[in-house]
Image: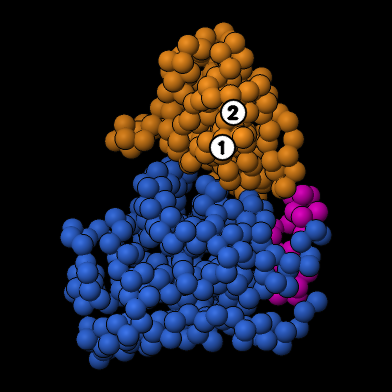
Chain colours: A orange, B blue
């Protein structure tokens, strides 16, 4: 029986329960970073809202998963705490959508993506696959038994 | 294409907001009404009273102690705030389990409505905009037209999905193209029929195109326009239209905001939106 573990907005979940699937819904401009270590059969996901916590240090202390800069490191720390190794972790990314907004006033999705890319670049982390951008709302799933990631957009589910 | 009469016929069959909300709407418009009048209207409706007290005690309304009566709520929050809360409580009762056409379960529609109300108010504070009264209620009820036209869209869901996949047209424009009207126009009709305040009527009508609102003061419509976009971006109650919506560039100019103010508003409201969003699941 598949157990669903839901990642809320501004939330992180890590699991090594092989019967479980981690899922997050309605990723608009938010981003899900999905990580999986095939050696440990352990995976995790963060659903963050905003790029930087610099202007909201109190919020970041209380709810670090709200921001890319304070949340993504915690996701990796939680994986390491489960015995995962950085070199084995496969990273996939989904979300970062945007409205029809020619002037870019609402470019939070793009900012979310750019800040994450910079962080990964600095830390030598490669993104194995991504499904980002567009006027889309996504549902992301990670199956812990085998690390299969699927993204559902407009009712259609596809493997990432 | 559906006719105006068909839509109005549907409106007649909808569950209506508790009559108390319309009565309160008249009371807040009247300079002579008293707290006692408010209490007399709300108290006979026990389910409205119960939902009102639950909402009034949420962190968002910032009361330091628990309120246990309508009278106490009026004393501590004032009659305008109590109207906001009564409208929310009444609205929560009439959302169907699933909104046809938009593919939205009631929990998502409620979450979206409450998110827009909270985001619009917080945005006004962040931007130092003096918000006209009833911003909360206007934000909460902005999409009420969807209650009436959802069933007309249901038969068109497949073609709607195809058109949305092209990512060239906004959802509200597709409504107009397919039905000959949109949830804004229908929302206006519904708000008038339910005797809701003008602020609610105008916001329901113009929240997708504030620039067409003519010579009314658009501050409230502008704030709800932006709050609505933000709510969709953060997935507070995603519907079939998802992010297929446009931002009116004139609104950004009028309200004078930038991406940093939007980010501040978003981070500060997440907990409150979630708390109230889960209240009537």
State the mark number for residue A61.
Answer: none
Image quarter of the N terminus of chain B: bottom right
Please tell me which residue is depicted at 70% across the width and 75% down the height of the picture.
B181
Q: Is residue A67 visible?
A: no
Residue A27 picture location, percent across and down: 58, 42
Q: Is residue A144 above or below residue B211?
A: above
Instruction: Read off the residue under disc 2.
Output: A19
Q: Secondary structure at mark 1?
A: strand
Marks 1 and 2 belong to one chain: yes
Q: Residues within 10 Å of mark 1 (few under 14, many from 20)?
A: some
Q: Secondary structure at mark 2?
A: loop
Instruction: Say if the magenta span includes residue A103.
Output: no
The chain letter under disc 2 is A
Residue B5 picture location, percent across and down: 71, 88
Instruction: Read off the residue under disc 1.
Output: A4
Q: Is residue A12 visible?
A: yes
Query: What is the total number of numbered labels drawn onto the structure image?
Result: 2
Please tell me which residue is depicted at 67% across the width and 56% down the height of the picture.
B240
Q: State which quadrant residue A140 falls in.
A: top right
Q: Residues within 10 Å of mark 2 (few under 14, many from 20)?
A: few
For marks 1 and 2, the one nearer the N-term is 1
Instruction: Say if the magenta span includes residue B164.
Output: yes
Q: Which residues are magenta?
A: B160-181
The chain letter under disc 1 is A
Residue B41 left/right relative to A8: left
Residue A21 left/right relative to B195: right
Q: State which quadrant residue B189 falls in.
A: bottom right
Residue B189 left/right relative to A49: right
Residue A31 picture location, percent across and down: 55, 35
Please tell me which residue is depicted at 73% across the width and 39% down the height of the picture.
A157
């Amino acid at each position: 029986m598949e157990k669903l573990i839901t990642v809320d907005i501004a939330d992180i979940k890590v699991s090594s329960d092989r019967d479980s699937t981690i899922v997050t819904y309605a990723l608009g401009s938010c981003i899900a970073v999905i990580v999986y270590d095939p050696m440990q059969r352990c995976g995790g996901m963060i659903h963050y809202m905003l790029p930087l916590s610099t202007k909201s240090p109190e919020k970041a202390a209380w709810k670090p998963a709200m921001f890319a800069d304070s949340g993504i490191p915690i996701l990796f720390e939680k994986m390491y705490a489960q015995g995962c190794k950085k070199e084995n972790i496969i990273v996939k990314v989904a979300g970062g959508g945007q409205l029809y907004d020619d002037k870019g006033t609402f470019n939070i999705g793009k900012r979310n993506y750019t800040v994450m890319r910079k962080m990964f670049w600095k830390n030598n982390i490669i993104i194995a696959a991504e499904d980002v951008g567009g006027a889309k709302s996504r549902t992301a799933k990670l199956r812990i038994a085998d690390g299969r990631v699927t993204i559902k957009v407009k009712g259609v589910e596809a493997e990432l | 294409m559906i006719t105006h009469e068909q839509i109005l016929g549907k409106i007649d069959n909808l569950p209506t907001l508790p009559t108390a909300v319309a009565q309160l709407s008249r009371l807040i418009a009247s300079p002579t009404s008293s707290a006692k009048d408010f209490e007399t209207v709300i108290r006979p409706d026990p389910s409205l009273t119960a939902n009102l007290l639950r909402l009034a005690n949420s962190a968002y309304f910032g009361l330091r102690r628990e309120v246990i009566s309508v009278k106490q709520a009026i004393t501590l929050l004032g009659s305008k705030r109590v109207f906001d809360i009564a409208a929310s409580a009444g609205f929560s009762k009439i959302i169907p389990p699933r909104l046809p056409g938009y593919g939205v379960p009631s929990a998502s529609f409620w979450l979206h409505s409450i998110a827009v109300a909270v985001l619009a108010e917080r945005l006004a504070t962040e931007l130092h905009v003096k918000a006209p009264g009833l911003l909360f209620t206007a934000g909460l009820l902005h999409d009420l037209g969807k209650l009436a036209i959802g069933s007309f869209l249901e038969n068109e869901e497949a073609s709607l999905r195809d058109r949305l996949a092209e990512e060239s047209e906004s959802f509200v424009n597709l409504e107009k193209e397919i039905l000959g009207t949109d949830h804004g126009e229908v929302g206006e009709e519904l708000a008038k029929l339910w005797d809701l305040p003008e602020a609610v009527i105008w916001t329901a009508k113009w929240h997708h195109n504030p620039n067409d609102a003519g010579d009314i003061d658009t501050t409230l419509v502008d704030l709800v326009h932006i709050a609505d976009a933000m709510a969709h971006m953060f997935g507070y109650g995603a519907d079939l239209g998802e992010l297929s919506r446009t931002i009116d560039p004139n609104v950004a100019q009028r309200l004078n905001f930038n991406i940093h103010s939007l980010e501040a508003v978003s981070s500060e409201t997440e907990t409150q939106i979630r708390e109230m969003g889960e209240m009537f699941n």
